[in-house]
Image: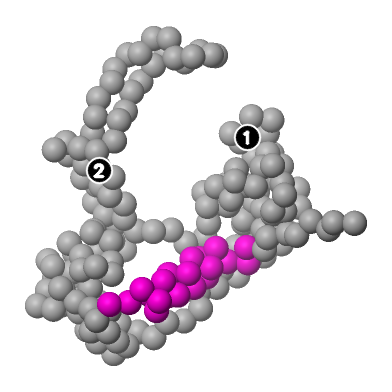
Amino acid sequence: MHKAKALRFPSMLTAAATLLMLALVFCSTPGYAQVKPGDQITPENAYKVKDMVAPGVFYKVERGMVMHIIPTQRVDWPPPYKDATEKYSSQVRLTQDHRSLLGYVAGQPFPLIDANDPDVGVKVIWNNVFRPITSDDYDLRFFDCDTEYESKGPQRGQIEYFQLGHYGRLRSGWTDRSRTATD
């Protein structure tokens, strides 16, 4: 009898960090060797990390943010998040349309996902929505947007359609600076 394998996501951040580190090791170029633990990245040597960090991070380094390069280390879930996941995840269910969760209180909604589950993708996305650690910036370029009257079936009453050239958000510590611009 075939036994379904379950995917364990004890820390999606740890898995992502591991994959990133493996990619850096296998796909590294001489530029990556320029940065090592103990280094300090300032506007004067920001070029060393240009291809290694998000555009928003590079922007901040060029304008005075200092990066202290430290050895890689495991980043575990905060204890309250881990405790909440263990306590509440067994009661979480998807609604029929998959747009909401039933029984969610806190923590990761679906820490164990069966690879054969037809809803595996939706559950991974819900885990991503309720992850304990988030990225600090994003940068979207050249995407389409439209608004419509909401109804079942195909789109029927487009109100507005436009293309956005650039939408980005850079968050730093306790401050939040949003910028929207069309190119």
Q: Which mark is residue 141?
A: 2
Which secondary structure, mark 2?
A: strand
The residue drawn where x is 19% and y is 77% is: 48
Amino acid at pointer 1: His
Q: Which label lies toward us, 2 or 1?
A: 2
Tell me if 39 is positioned left or right of 77 in this view. left
Q: Residue at x 20, y 65 (%)?
A: 58
- Per the image, label 1 sits on a secondary structure element best described as loop
- Asked if 103 appears above or below 130 in the picture, the reply is above
Residue under the image location 23 percent in, 73 percent down: 49
- Circle 1 sits on which residue? 98
- The residue closer to the viewer here, 3 or 42, is 3
The answer to whether one can see residue 114 in this image is: yes
Q: Which residues are magenta?
A: 9-29
- In the image: residue 9, left or right of residue 114: left
Q: Is residue 100 left or right of residue 46?
A: right
Q: Amino acid at mark 2?
A: Arg
Residue 89 visible from this viewpoint: no
Task: Report the residue at 24% width, 87% height from top.
Answer: 39
Give above or below for 159 relative to 78. above
Examine the rendered structure and indicate whether residue 146 appears above or below residue 11.
above
**Quadrant showing the N terminus:** bottom right
